[in-house]
Image (cartoon, rainbow, N blue to C red):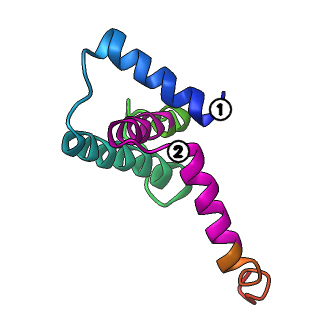
Amino acid sequence: MTIEEAQKQVDDWIKTYGVRYFSELTNMAVLTEEVGELARIMARTYGDQSFKEGEKRDLSDEMADVLWVLICLANQTGINLTEAFLRNLEKKTNRDKDRHKNNPKL
């Protein structure tokens, strides 16, 4: 699935099952909440914290939740994520093409 196809699929789902998009501000809050849930699993899986009994451990589901809400926000604000990602990749390449190679910490 391409990013463009994902944006269309989310939009179709919202129009079919979701009635309408939540407001942009609500979706920003939801995105923050989903990133927090992802961070919790990362901290418990790869960090020093441990899981509580019965606590959710599905890292892939949390990443998909973050992606879903990000796509919702892109759709609502008229952002083509494919174009935005390609521009961002070019920016990073131009800015950092030698930076990481020359970093003695890496």
Q: Main secondary structure of the magenta part?
A: helix
Residue 86, image x, y percentages:
64, 54
Seen at 50% across and 40% down, the residue is: 63
Res 4 → quadrant: top right
Residue 51, image x, y percentages:
42, 43
Mark 2 and mark 1 lie on one chain; the one further toward the N terminus is 1
**Amino acid type, callout 2:** Leu
> Which of the pair 9/62 is nearer the observer?
9
Q: Which mark is residue 2?
A: 1
**Circle 2 SS class:** helix
> Which of the pair 37/43 is nearer the observer?
37
Q: Are marks 2 and 1 in contact (CB under 8 Å)?
A: no
**Amino acid type, callout 1:** Thr
Residue labelled with disc 2: 81
> Which of the pair 13/33 is nearer the observer?
13
Q: Residue 84 lies in magenta, yes or no? A: yes
Dot 1 crowding, Cα within 10 Å, few <14, some 14–19, many 20+: few
Left or right of residue 4: residue 79:
left
Left or right of residue 26: residue 44:
right
Q: Residue 73 lies in magenta, yes or no? A: yes
Magenta span covers which residues?
64-93
Residue 55, image x, y percentages:
38, 34
Seen at 29% across and 16% down, the residue is: 18
Q: CA distance from mark 2 to mark 1?
A: 10 Å
Left or right of residue 22: residue 101:
right
Looking at the picture, does residue 37 appear above or below residue 99?
above
Seen at 33% across and 44% down, the residue is: 31
Question: Which quadrant of the figure contains the N terminus?
Answer: top right
Left or right of residue 83: residue 61:
left
Q: Which mark is residue 102?
A: none
